[in-house]
Amino acid sequence: MISNSVKGCIALVFALFGLTLNFVVILTVAAKRRLHKMHYFLLANLSMSDFVFHILVIFLGVSHLKKQWVFGMAWCKGTSYLIRCVFTTSITLLCATTWECHTAVVTPFAFSSDITTKKIIVVALLGIGS
């Protein structure tokens, strides 16, 4: 049986590792002009969603180390709600990425991976809706 302290340390290490790598992905997509295509935009959004999840995991790791939730009942319920929201957003973004790839395969000559206003509105509505 793994103790709460070990679980907390493992969660914190994975959270910091995930925060770092997702931040690198977001910065890379933002900094490189040639990566300003729709599939990289979706990848950056997925990294942002994962980044928020890893921030929430830090709270869970600290609660395992302290062996109790020390952030208050409101934040306990808020964290649980936000984790569900992040998972729903991630699934929606994965579906949007799959649709983008499907469109590229089915209509290769008519497909454009450029970011258009229509695509941004669709991704924004997917994010808000999820």
Image: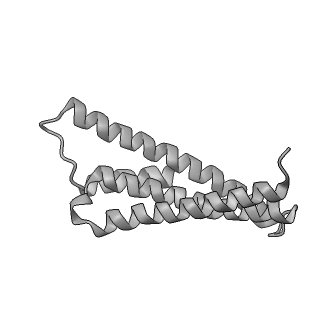
Query: Measured along the vertical axis of the image, is residue 60 above or below residue 90?
Result: below
Which residue corresponds to the image point at 30% horizontal and 38% vertical from the top-left? 101
* Residue 56: quarter of image: bottom right
* Residue 60 in view of the camera: no
Of 89 and 34, which appears nearest the observer? 34
Q: Residue furthest left?
A: 109
* Residue 63: quarter of image: bottom right
Which residue corresponds to the image point at 34% horizontal and 38% vertical from the top-left? 99
Of 84 and 46, which appears nearest the observer? 46
Which residue corresponds to the image point at 83% horizontal and 48% vertical from the top-left? 2
Of 30 and 110, which appears nearest the observer? 30
Where residue 35 sits: x, y (%)? 26, 59
Pick the quarter of the image with the N terminus: top right
Taking the image as shown, residue 26 lies to the left or right of residue 76, namely left
Taking the image as shown, residue 88 lies to the left or right of residue 37, namely right
Q: How many marks?
A: 0
Q: Residue furthest top?
A: 106
Query: Measured along the vertical axis of the image, is residue 102 above or below residue 41?
Result: above
Where residue 40 sits: x, y (%)? 32, 54
Query: Measured along the vertical axis of the image, is residue 24 above or below residue 94?
Result: below
Which residue corresponds to the image point at 21% horizontal and 53% vertical from the top-left? 114
Where residue 100 sits: x, y (%)? 31, 41
Taking the image as shown, residue 100 lies to the left or right of residue 75, namely left
* Residue 129 in view of the camera: yes
Where residue 81 sits: x, y (%)? 68, 55
**Image coloring type:** one colour
